[in-house]
Amino acid sequence: FVIPLDRVVECVELPGTLGESRECMDLRGEVLPFVRLRSRFGIPGDRPRRENVVVVDHAGTKTGLVVNSLMGEFQTVIKPLGRLFQHVRGIGGATILGDGEVALILDVPMLVRHRADQAQDQFG
């Protein structure tokens, strides 16, 4: 996945003490809700021993995106998704990386709103 750099606040390691069912973490005294991208997009396989959290911001709301690894910073050209993929929520487009691999670009505002809606439903 590609996360637009203008949405990224920071990257931190997910504490290994958090269980699979936890949906938030302590980030320097602040409660940071997060989205596990593996779960959100139904990616099969075992969870890696070490995961990272990309802290993103949309409209003043911080949310963490839990990822397997960080690949670095790349300049990309965003290509819109065709009609076949319009129903996929959380994906804003695609790009072709330097090695020819296709990467999906995350729709950060939608993921942040979705996480906030889940928290409101859960806690009233």
Image (tube, rainbow, N blue to C red):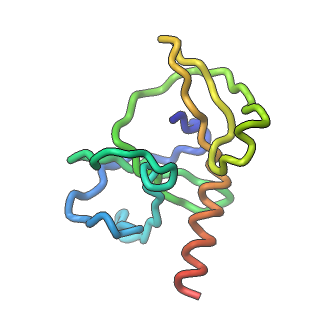
Relative to residue 49, is residue 42 drawn left or right? right
Can you say whether 112 is above or below 11 in the image? below
Whole-percent x and y of residue 19? 26, 66
Residue at x 37% of width, y 63% of height:
27
Whole-percent x and y of residue 84? 74, 36
Whole-percent x and y of residue 91? 64, 43
The number of numbered badges drawn on the structure is: 0
Residue at x 38% of width, y 45% of height:
44
Q: Quadrant of residue 116?
A: bottom right
Residue at x 61% of width, y 39% of height:
6
Can you say whether 102 is above or below 35 in the image? above
Can you say whether 69 is above or below 21 in the image? above
Can you say whether 121 is above or below 16 in the image? below
Q: Residue furthest top?
A: 99
Whole-percent x and y of residue 48? 25, 45
Residue at x 58% of width, y 21% of height:
75
Q: Nearer the viewer, residue 100 or 32?
A: 100
Relative to residue 59, is residue 61 drawn left or right? left
Relative to residue 84, is residue 22 drawn left or right? left
In the rendered image, which quarter contains the C terminus? bottom right
Q: Residue furthest right?
A: 83
Relative to residue 32, is residue 28 drawn left or right? left
